[in-house]
Image (cartoon, coloured by chain):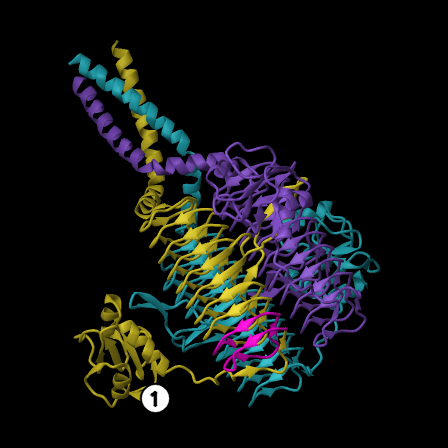
Chain colours: A yellow, B cyan, C purple
Amino acid sequence: MFTTAQIAEKIGARLAGDGSVEIKAVGPAGAACATDITFAADDKHREALANSAAAAVIVNELADNFGGPQLIVKDVNAALIETMKLFAPKLTPAAAGVHPTSVIGQNVEIADSASLGPNVTIADNVRIADNCVLAAGVRIGENCTIGRDTRLDSNVVVYHNCRIGSGVIIQANTTVGSTGFGYAPVNGRPVLIPHNGGVVIEDFVEIGANCCIDRAKFGNTIIGAGTKIDNLVQIAHNVVIGKCCLIVGQVGISGSSRLGDGVVLAGQVGIVDNVTIGDGVIIGAQAGVVRDTPAGKKLLGSPAIDYAEKVREFALAHRLPKMAEQLKELIKKVNALEAAANDKK
Amino acid sequence: MFTTAQIAEKIGARLAGDGSVEIKAVGPAGAACATDITFAADDKHREALANSAAAAVIVNELADNFGGPQLIVKDVNAALIETMKLFAPKLTPAAAGVHPTSVIGQNVEIADSASLGPNVTIADNVRIADNCVLAAGVRIGENCTIGRDTRLDSNVVVYHNCRIGSGVIIQANTTVGSTGFGYAPVNGRPVLIPHNGGVVIEDFVEIGANCCIDRAKFGNTIIGAGTKIDNLVQIAHNVVIGKCCLIVGQVGISGSSRLGDGVVLAGQVGIVDNVTIGDGVIIGAQAGVVRDTPAGKKLLGSPAIDYAEKVREFALAHRLPKMAEQLKELIKKVNALEAAANDKK
Amino acid sequence: MFTTAQIAEKIGARLAGDGSVEIKAVGPAGAACATDITFAADDKHREALANSAAAAVIVNELADNFGGPQLIVKDVNAALIETMKLFAPKLTPAAAGVHPTSVIGQNVEIADSASLGPNVTIADNVRIADNCVLAAGVRIGENCTIGRDTRLDSNVVVYHNCRIGSGVIIQANTTVGSTGFGYAPVNGRPVLIPHNGGVVIEDFVEIGANCCIDRAKFGNTIIGAGTKIDNLVQIAHNVVIGKCCLIVGQVGISGSSRLGDGVVLAGQVGIVDNVTIGDGVIIGAQAGVVRDTPAGKKLLGSPAIDYAEKVREFALAHRLPKMAEQLKELIKKVNALEAAANDKK
């Protein structure tokens, strides 16, 4: 528990109002209870303050529709994140060292500050840097490197020859470096093309649970620095993803396609193979991208087209029954006019 | 092997016909062989009896298109389930106790009747109730509770601060309590918002393999009692699901959306964030739900609209080529009529 | 490193040009560097040779747009695969034998040449044939058989009563034999129908990472010989798949549906339950198949219809705004014509 004054001090906020109010948790304006602090990062949040039960609020300027103490900051999101950390559940930190049930290969370097949990297996020629945490059941293949401050959660599997950067998080049951779906017909049957390449996951990438990142046939599959990936996402062989992209749950990106920086793919989007998506492109949920897309475009639909155009198409599709009726009536009228004209001849 | 009379007795059926017929398995009417018992739970099944090779049938009233012995019950589904149990493969029951290769934290309470398989890891402050079965490689984080008669299959990962009820089944490689996809832009880069909440899985929930249930940012992600979830399903942070919902494979439900009771989501459905789906709503396969949906509605399409309306749209879409042609012809005719009218002036 | 002459000899190619050129890797024409050998398996590849930096090329006839040494073979794909093997990273072969941390049940037969890694658990009555490799954390249930030369990667879970053939590959975190999504309403609540059947995976099947193959209610779920399955694919209970099918990432096949031989399902396709898909059918990405489909058909869309027809529909959908305008104008004109005609009466 913290008082509003304590929170203000810890997050560097200017406090307007009572500093002695006791806060037990953080909650969104609409669902907060009387011992919560809430936050207003956008107009929708600001409006919701009027009916919020929260005891206090973090804002970037005084809200006149909220009666309790207000903590005024420059960047509400940054302040929210700091406040959430204050109220995070207290968990036992992972102990440095290698759990005795782990199985470590030859020529492996593990930093003293790294933590390897129970039943971790590390193959030969692996390097694990400072402060890494490998939870129970993580499997690391030959010749991998794991950068400092990186966290691999339980049962993550990393195949051989993958390079994982610093400050990376990979959540449970995700697979990195699986062989891609690359088959060539030989004598009429599909035969696997060897995947000689690897995977490079750059610094500060965060990957959700139960994802698959396939290794490359040639060179590397690359996830650019700062990119964030949700759960159950499929990244195929030789895909190259830029920096700070946001890839939402159940997206699939097919082989050798390339994303620029800051691309946003909403849930369940599919990208065909061998296309290039420019910087800052935004793709709406469930869309299917089938061609190269220039930077800054916003697409929707399957196949995906310009977002605004697709929204218009959806609207017109709803008018199809009406259009069909109008067409039917017109045909009747025109036929009547023609018959009348013929009669006159 | 059981005789028809034995089965009738065990499932409380009235037997019409020969009680000495030997039955080796249960099979659907169309695929049953001569030593199978089949069942007719609906009209389609009843019709299929005419051509079924099955030796006997479970029905709720005598079928006149089937020659073999008939077992008459009030509830065919309930009787089928009991009959299937009779013929279930005999497996060694999980032995009570903790396998010596398991790693157990501090302040952990495990009921004597619970079974923990090889390589299970349990963090601190966990409670595991009577008759639980945790298969090999299950990982349970700090402060979790697992209710009685619950079964977690191999390599399931449950993060800290999750509450799992009684009679729950979670199948292999599923992840519960992963951090959700909640990022806020700070200095132009996406930064993770701490997820201080947990997951509550209520009694008699059943979850398939390789699913992801994210923990909440605030409060809890909640799966209501009796809800059943198929494989590869994504449930995002702060989602609240009601009781006895059916959620089919590869569905994705985005953050903070709420489902009522008895909602049915067919395969590969997507639900955007922050929407409310009323009791008994049915969403057709691959649909994308983008707005609040009142109780009892049936939707289809992406974006999802009223089911019947969408079916009409699909039909009209097939008529588009014809409509385009009709339109072209009409334009020609009207132009001719106008020209003729002008000539007359 | 190999010279062009050495590669030609090893893959049985006729060498046209310098045999002393040193090759370090294989690369696609567009991305190859000056020490790579490339390949031209189709027209697109052949055209790309003109601008390729590659030092040498594998072709089936002399390319006149490429200056370096050419290795001429009958089947470029087969030769490419052999060449890729030459340059594959050298990994430590899995050691024969059972790792001491593995836990083996009763009445288990494991071939001397098989390799079981750390923390593998094998239940009772399992047979594992020659040269199998079960990586760390694999779990095999009761009464399973694993054919020779089969490879199960880390943390794969196989439930009881599954039969896996020879030469099979199953990648990390995949689940085989989970209970399917089969519920029947009893007293108004969904109750699980026991799944008494198993799974049969025939020879030379290859399955990606984080897939789910459900066991059958009756009989077996069957994956036919030579079929290849990508990552995150869902195969429901009692599905029967023919030989040499290609099933791309995130596809879902619902209960009891049947695929013929050589079927191709592109990414994120969904197949409803109880339909039959004929030999050689091709389904485009994100399509939803809702009915039986005869052999040789090519479908697209959700719901899926004939491919060419759907492409036409998509094109016409883009013309909808124009059609709506034309219709509006026509109505105006026809009304004017009618008014004029009435005036004349």
Instruction: Give percent across and percent down for residue B334.
Output: 27, 22
Q: Chain of mark 1?
A: A
Q: Which residues are magenta?
A: A106-133
Residue at 42%, 54% (x, y): give it: B288
Mark 1, residue position = A1
**Dot 1: few (<14), some (14–19), or many (≥20) neighbours within 10 Å?**
few
* Secondary structure of residue under mark 1: loop
**Above-or-below relation of C222 to C94:** above
Is residue A87 shown left or right of residue A158? left
Instruction: Give percent across and percent down for residue A205.
Output: 43, 66
Question: To which quarter of the image does residue B131 belong?
Answer: bottom right
Instruction: Give percent across and percent down for residue A106.
Output: 63, 73
Total marks in image: 1
- Dominant SS in magenta: loop
Q: Which is nearer the eye, A190 or C175?
A: A190
Q: Amino acid at mark 1?
A: Met
Residue placed furthest toward the top: A345
- Can residue B302 be seen by looking at this rendering? yes
Quadrant, the N terminus of chain B:
bottom right
